[in-house]
Amino acid sequence: MANKAQVLYEFIAEAGNNELSVREGETITIINQNVGGGWIEAQNSNGDVGLVPEDYIEVNSSAAPSAQQTQATIGSYDAHSSEPAHTQGTNGSDPWSSSAWTGNNSPPGNWDYGGQQQTPAFQQQGSLDDDEWDDESDDGRSAGGYSQAEDGGATQRGGTSHPSMKISLNKFPFSKTPNPEVYLLGKLPNKGKERLSIFMGEVGPVWLYPQTPLDCIVADPKKGTKMYGLKSYIEYQITPSTTNRAVNHRYKHFDWLYERLLEKFGSAIPIPCLPDKQITGRFDDDFIKIRMERLQGWMSRMCRHPVVCESEVFQLFVNYKDERDWKVGKRKAEKDETMGVMIFSTIEPEAPDLDPIEVEQKCDMYSRFTKSMDDGVKDLLNVGHLHWKRCTGPLQKEYQKIGKAFQNLSNVFTTSGYTGETTLTEALTATGRTYEEIAEIVASQPKQDLHFLLETNSEYKGLLGCFPDTIGVHKAAIEKWKEADRLVAMNKINHQDKLTMAKRLSTMSYSLQAEMNHFHSNRIYDYNRVMRLYLEQQVKFYETIADKLRQALGQYADL
Amino acid sequence: MANKAQVLYEFIAEAGNNELSVREGETITIINQNVGGGWIEAQNSNGDVGLVPEDYIEVNSSAAPSAQQTQATIGSYDAHSSEPAHTQGTNGSDPWSSSAWTGNNSPPGNWDYGGQQQTPAFQQQGSLDDDEWDDESDDGRSAGGYSQAEDGGATQRGGTSHPSMKISLNKFPFSKTPNPEVYLLGKLPNKGKERLSIFMGEVGPVWLYPQTPLDCIVADPKKGTKMYGLKSYIEYQITPSTTNRAVNHRYKHFDWLYERLLEKFGSAIPIPCLPDKQITGRFDDDFIKIRMERLQGWMSRMCRHPVVCESEVFQLFVNYKDERDWKVGKRKAEKDETMGVMIFSTIEPEAPDLDPIEVEQKCDMYSRFTKSMDDGVKDLLNVGHLHWKRCTGPLQKEYQKIGKAFQNLSNVFTTSGYTGETTLTEALTATGRTYEEIAEIVASQPKQDLHFLLETNSEYKGLLGCFPDTIGVHKAAIEKWKEADRLVAMNKINHQDKLTMAKRLSTMSYSLQAEMNHFHSNRIYDYNRVMRLYLEQQVKFYETIADKLRQALGQYADL
């Protein structure tokens, strides 16, 4: 249901700023509460859409999220006008607050992360057409990513409903699997060839990393058509470093891969969602560029993950030989039964079993850490977003005005008719031009540095958003183990079952530890890299300006 | 009469910003329309005073100046909170638009210039008490500077009326002198010893400059009291470079000097008004400091003027030996009759007479130039003012937030429990602190550079504001000369009178040219100096930030 809001104070839109004028007392419909910077996107009764200051309106209490939540969900950064605004809905629930998730059929809500729509972890797209998706859009919306199962019913999400969306509620192969009981107490399938190794490294339990690291290049987006040119889509070229042989994929193929990875590894490994599924302007050059950059980031992260990169489905995606190979592999992947919590059955840690108390302590620590980091990352995104807006907006204009003011004065001085004016007027004109140049430098700088800082943090925001689901499975397992004594007393399980539970809980904990250690090492690498890049560019930025001003200074007469 | 305004839109004051909350439809009293940056100072019916956005109100049409004028009169810069806001009135008339002023008794209005109240040129303070001013305030308001003669009546100016003001309407020794006829056609007094020499220099007619340039230092403001401590005032020490012997003066003495210089030289030399006459907080350290700085600027400019610095009254001011000497000199100066247009009678240009046509062309050129420069200076003041506000407001806060965000993230990272985190967290903390330092540097920078740029432009704004009056006398003389043929035909003057007029007009023109050349040479010197200073500081500013960021960058691990 769309949120309505009352306008508290009259607000007059500034031309060219995508703002919406509103009158005191008017009722408006909130379209997007997450644009950030103290703005919301709203529609008035005439159907006009635009930005309105958050403080000028009061969201009707029945539907109003708390101020804190509003704050927390700010994230997508559309600071630069050439980047498409992310206008996705959020259901406003806070995954961090659901401290334990005990395996019922109501998955915790998910939320918007830096413009990336987190598809509920235990909800899967139904492969309506096994052979090919014949939907009309290339943006993944048809994959049911916007629908959410809740108590068996379906709720349309966050105001982005569209009659042509196909919502697949008929197949929820995952809907039982999040209950860790299946793994903790069930009879495990015969061991196949799939093995996930964990060994003790310097930092604790770690995944086995492949000998040859995989990376890939996402490049060369090409517009393709089908249905005699009626439908068009963008195809990207993916070249893995191992084979150096390019394969082509459309966004929906990425989305398919994401769904497979999520259902297979989601209980053990947070699978970051894909870059946002933007509808409007999806053939826009800037949009294609930023989507490709983000797909590259996503693929690189997947390539760097020792478990994901070695998985059959991922190898299929980057290495398929031909259409036939792809289709056969696709069908096989969709029938893979080692998924959900059963992924833990493939893990064999080479380490002594852990005490469940220790397991719980570690789990709580990870939960706290990822929650805190999520807050920190959002904070940085918010302020970065504001800074971007300032640089490309008021600050650029101001330096332009300063430049113009100096040039104006210089122009006036040339009309004085006084001799010996030239040195000053030329220097003043040069100064004015320098400030105009500075205006352009200031406005384009965020693309040189802030962009990467925000992209990395956006990526981490997306990744961190997957942790509540992944950690939730572990917490549920711990809760289940705590019930063990009672279940033994009730004769529902025997003592051996309890020992098995503890052992399997230990395996799960090793998996989580290995994953966290992977996360930490990547995090340190990524932040070190992006901060270096940011600061290098910032130094260059200030030095360039200093140089330009020094040149202008050189034109004035010595005193 | 105070301007009233209707509130168009509700405005909620932001705490700590000197803003005033207003309701739609409310009537408020405008106190100061010239605070700049799109704000006006207003008072509501409860007597609360504060800033309200210009766009939110509609000035009652009878008293409303045009938007352009409002724009043009923005000027006083109170960007930094430690500087007192200038809250002076303006009557909103535009002196530049009165293209010719034909010497009647209604002088064109004057207006606010960068915080300097231009006292009407042809209106003089009555020396009610010949011996000493015993008024209660030290700010010059009692000197009648806010009253204006218009058609023989008096109008209270710009909303700053005060019942305790003494308005002296009884003595207007100047009220006849602006008419250049007295000089053009009158019998000139016997030549006294007073001589203003003009000779032909490289750039054209120039004043004779003194062999030893005079300068003085205004320093050491001391609080004094009188009337058994009931009244207090600030006394400044003035030390002229010629004698190196300090004399003491209160602000009102400066004001007295200003009035003397204005009445004596105002027709030939634009006498810039004194720094604004601020009432509130006049014993505040910051106020005393800025007033002293501006008095210094004013004194230096007067010292640099070859005619002013050599005048008896100015020499008295900087060189009086004792109280008796001062009082005698003061009385003598007040009785000086060579003032107004009669100052031209003391001028003897060593050059051939000019054709009145040429005189008019030059006069028009000066008029255009000073008008254009006035616009340019105001433009620069406006944008500088905005920039100052940005640096000390949103920009400082933003860099602080960026700094905090990096430090937050660093704090979170230290809780990871992962080994090998230290280099990153220390580097991140250092980066955060660096941005906090940058915030302080950004906020304090305007005091290092923009301050001087704005002060110089404010000074020029004040100076340029005197030109319409000075040039007006010349234009009136030209108009009078144009009537000469008609007057000859009507037998009101004879042919010889006409020749005398042309000769005296030529003298006036030489005087104006000498003054303009003095102005130009000072302008080139001043702008060259202040631009160098500004750019030097700007370069240093950007270099300092680059250095600090480079240091932070050095703390990250090499990749």
Image (tube, coloured by chain):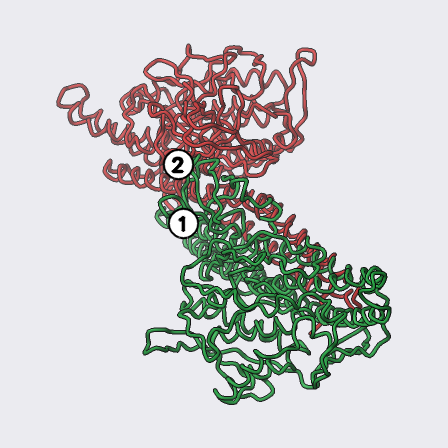
Chain colours: A green, B red
Q: Where is residue B431 drawn, in percent x and y?
A: 69, 59
Q: Where is residue A196 drawn, in percent x and y?
A: 72, 80
The answer to whether tags 1 and 2 share a subunit is no
**Which kind of residue does numbered mark 1 sit on?**
Val
Disc 1 chain ID: A
**Residue B305 horizontal side relative to residue A340, left or right:** left
- Residue B239 visible somewhere in the drawing: no
Q: Is residue B120 above or below residue B371?
A: above
Q: Where is residue A474 drawn, in percent x and y?
A: 74, 64
Label annotation for residue B72: 2
Q: Where is residue B492 drawn, in percent x and y?
A: 18, 19
Could you say which is closer to the camera, residue A312 or residue B123? A312
Could you say which is closer to the camera, residue A411 or residue A43? A43
Query: Who's the residue at 70% across and 11% down the image?
Result: B228
Label annotation for residue B453: none
Label annotation for residue A49: 1
Measured Cα–Cα span from mark 1 to mark 2: 36 Å
- Mark 2 surroundings within 10 Å by alpha-carbon count, few (fewer than 14), some (14 through 19), many (20 or more): many
**Which kind of residue does numbered mark 2 sit on?**
Ala
- Dot 2: element: helix
Examine the image and state in which quarter residue B100 appears.
top left
- Dot 1: element: strand
Q: Is residue B501 above or below residue A5?
A: above
Query: Who's the residue at 73% across and 71% down the image?
Result: A183
Q: Quadrant of the N terminus of chain B?
A: top left
- Residue A377 visible somewhere in the drawing: yes
Q: Quadrant of the C terminus of chain B?
A: bottom right
**Front tag of 1 and 2:** 1
Q: Is residue B294 above or below residue A346?
A: above
Examine the image and state in which quarter residue B66 appears.
top left
